[in-house]
Structures are given as structure tokens and as C-alpha cells.
Image: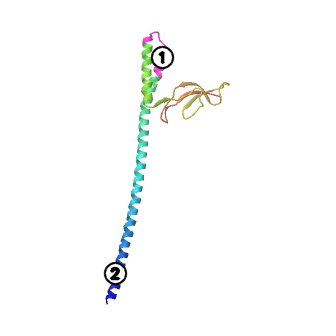
Amino acid sequence: MVEEEKKEEKVENKEVEKEENSELEKTKQELDEITDRLKRIMAEFENFKKRSSKERENLYNSLVSDIVASFLPVQDNLEKAISTGTKDKAYEEGIKLVLKQLKDVLAYNGVKEIETVGKEFDPELHEAVSHVTDEKLGKNIIKEEFRKGYIIGTKVIRHSMVIVAN
């Protein structure tokens, strides 16, 4: 009888062990699933942060470029006033200082002039208003600039109006 009891205990112990192992495996599997879900959510959140940052930067550049575009005709007119010249040197110096201040503000906000004369024509940056033949210049080289163009980052605020050689 004692032997039968021991056998029954062993059988019961094995069944309890199996149940515990089964529960342990189930718990491990649930933990793995939760860990995997957590990793995926963390990766999605990182992607969201990057995407949001890019969207904010693009929105900022778009807003700045819209504002800057409204100031560009003012800068053009100040440059024309200086090139016209005047007998009043103090007046001319005042115009130069205002123009310099405007250019400094634009530069501080990341606005840059697009390089043109002597550079290769790039339809992304330049607008060709005329083509001429010039033996001194190579093919698609910009000969002259009619109106300055500006960029902020990689966004073109205003295309340069140019004359292209050959």
C-alpha cells in the first residue's frame, strides 16, 4: 500500500509539474509577445518623432520662405536705388546700411543667394529668359543674371532669372 501511495504521489507530482511547466511556457510566451509589442511601439514612436520633426522643419521653412519672398522686392528696389546713384552721399550711405541690415537679417534666417554667372544652368534653381551664343563660355553656362534668386535650406524661394550661353 505504501508503494501504491508513493506511485500515486509521483504521478500527481508529475501532473503538477506538467501543469506548472505548461503555465510557465504560457507565461514565457505571453512575455515574449508583450516584449515584441513594446519594441514595435517604441520603434513606431521613434519614427513618429522623426516624421514630426521633419514636418515642423518643413513648415517653418515654408513660413519663412513666404515671408522672405514678400521682402525680396524691397531688397531689389534698394539695390536699384544704390546702382542709380545720387549726389547726396549721406543718403546713399543710408540706403547701403539699410540694404546691408536687410541682407544680414535674411542671412541670419538661412536665406542664401543662388550663384549664377559662370555656373552651369540648373532648372531647379534658375529660370532662363534668353539664350545667346558666346564662344568664350561653354554649353549651358550662365552669362548674365537679370534677377537674383534665393534659397532657404533646399527650398527655392525665388528662381534666378538668367541668360544662358550656347
Q: Report the front residue among 36 and 9.
A: 9
- At numbered mark 2, what does the secondary structure look like: helix, strand or loop? helix
Colouring scheme, one of rainbow, by chain, secondary structure, one colour: rainbow
Work out whether 165 lies above or below 95. Answer: below
Q: Residue furthest right?
A: 135
Disc 1 marks which amino acid?
Ile
Residue 82, numbered circle: 1
Provide the major secondary structure of the magenta segment: helix
Outermost residue, front side = 2
Drawn side of residue 14 relative to residue 154, left or right: left
Residue 12 tag number: 2
| Residue 32 image label | none
**Which range is magenta?**
76-90
What is the quadrant of the C terminus in the image?
Answer: top right
Work out whether mark 2 precedes mark 1 in sequence or the reverse, and give the earlier one. Answer: 2
Asked if the stretch drawn in magenta spans residue 126, the answer is: no
Q: Are marks 2 and 1 in contact (CB under 8 Å)?
A: no
User: Residue at left 40%, top 51%?
Assistant: 45
Q: Amino acid at mark 2?
A: Glu
